[in-house]
Image (cartoon, helix red, strand yellow):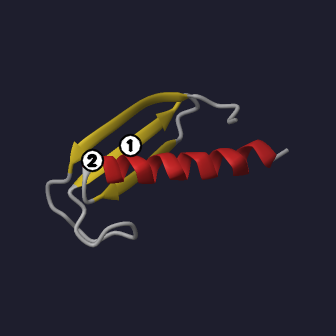
Amino acid sequence: MPDWNIAYIKTEPVKDPVPCHYSKAPRFRCTIELEDGSVITRCGGTAQHALANAIACYKTSAGQRSRQP
């Protein structure tokens, strides 16, 4: 489990869809801000897809971060 906490999660529509690594035509962007000020932003075709991408990144980052000395 991560040793750092989520401050807030925000999902919003993308005004001008530009292809990104996670979606060819993203319609939503999800931002997770952590209490330490770090920000994770991921996009997706639906709000749920953007949220799932952001959570997956958070979980991956949490594992990497907790292993750092």
Q: Is residue 59 visible?
A: yes
**Which residue is labeled 2 in the image?**
47
Name the residue type under label 2: Ala
* In this rendering, position of residue 50 left or right of residue 58: left
Residue at (39%, 34%) from the top-left corner? 9
Name the residue type under label 1: Thr
Q: Decide which of tag 1 and tag 2 comes sooner along the chain.
A: 1
Residue at (49%, 46%) from the top-left corner? 55
* In this rendering, position of residue 52 left or right of residue 37: left
Q: Is residue 24 above or below residue 5?
A: below
Neighbour class for label 1 at 10 Å: few (<14), some, many (≥20)? Answer: some
**Which residue is labeled 1 in the image?**
31
* In this rendering, position of residue 69 left or right of residue 55: right
- The picture places residue 32, in percent across and down from the top left corner, at 44, 39
The answer to whether the residues at label 1 and label 2 have Cβ atoms under 8 Å apart is no
- The picture places residue 26, in percent across and down from the top left corner, at 25, 62
Local SS, label 1: strand
Residue at (32%, 68%) from the top-left corner? 23
User: Which quarter of the rendering shows the N terminus?
Assistant: top right
Q: Nearer the viewer, residue 8 or 50?
A: 50
**Nearer the camera: disc 1 or disc 2:** 2
